[in-house]
Amino acid sequence: AQTVTQSQPEMSVQEAETVTLSCTYDTSESDYYLFWYKQPPSRQMILVIRQEAYKQQNATENRFSVNFQKAAKSFSLKISDSQLGDAAMYFCAYRSASSNSGYALNFGKGTSLLVTP
Amino acid sequence: NAGVTQTPKFRVLKTGQSMTLLCAQDMNHEYMYWYRQDPGMGLRLIHYSVGEGTTAKGEVPDGYNVSRLKKQNFLLGLESAAPSQTSVYFCASSYFLSRMMGIRANQPQHFGDGTRLSIL
């Protein structure tokens, strides 16, 4: 099974500043998908951004962007102009392009992001 | 459009009791999943279903059973609850994923709001 590692249990950023959350994964597959989910205190799982492994271009969604390094198996999330509402737990997730596990997500353990005024 | 609805949202059980968690989706999704979330562990897959009448084991299936008698519903059962099953349970669903069929596998899973289950 693929392993997803988030090495930063907690991160802190000041409002309006930029923060980068790291994620690495272990896989022997060449075709897969990567996701970042946000979980605020409300417990909802909210999709932040997604990346297809066969695309070299890094995905961007407004203030959120990724740095996808396929050879290094790295998928970091950059949050620009941080806002108080960005405070949450962030999960990195891997999905195989094969149907062996029903396209289920493999999650990292999460990074808790604190945003200070 | 309710999306993915989980019932109940909270529940406290005694060791040995049984219960069923219900997940319902109104998006006509083929795939459905049950995950559990424990502190410091992220979300882990319990069971999943790729269609009505089919289920399969995930990473942590022991102590749980599932059924998918209707396409829109995915039930998670605990036959004899144990304190180790204290967790937050999430249901998720997604469309059938196949690049061969022109349906891109980057479609995200849609999650319910979770069920907090405590077993004393």
Image: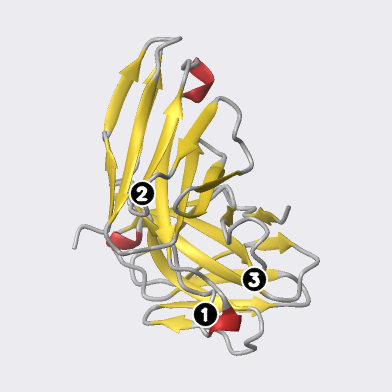
Write down the residue under mark 2: B70
Secondary element type, mark 1: loop
The C terminus of chain B: image quadrant: top left
From the top left corner, tell me how far across and down residue B64 is, in percent: 52, 29
| B59 lies above or below B84 | below
Q: Are marks 1 and 2 in contact (CB under 8 Å)?
A: no
Chain of the residue under label 2:
B
Measured Cα–Cα span from mark 1 to mark 2: 25 Å
Q: Nearer the viewer, mark 2 or mark 3?
A: 2
Identify the image's colour scheme: rainbow, by chain, secondary structure or one colour: secondary structure
Secondary element type, mark 3: loop
Residue at 66 percent of width and 54 percent of height: A5
Q: Quadrant of residue B61?
A: top right
| B94 lies above or below B76 | below
In this rendering, position of residue B64 left or right of residue A28:
left
Same chain letter for marks 3 and 1: no
Q: Are marks 3 and 1 in contact (CB under 8 Å)?
A: no
Identify the mark nearer the N-term, 1 or 2.
2
Residue A67 or A59: which is nearer the viewer?
A59
On residue B104, the disc is 1
For badge 1, the amino acid type reads Arg
In this rendering, position of residue A40 left or right of residue B58:
left
Measured Cα–Cα span from mark 3 to mark 1: 9 Å
For badge 2, the amino acid type reads Lys
Residue B9 visible in the snapshot: yes
Residue A114 visible in the snapshot: no
For badge 3, the amino acid type reads Ala
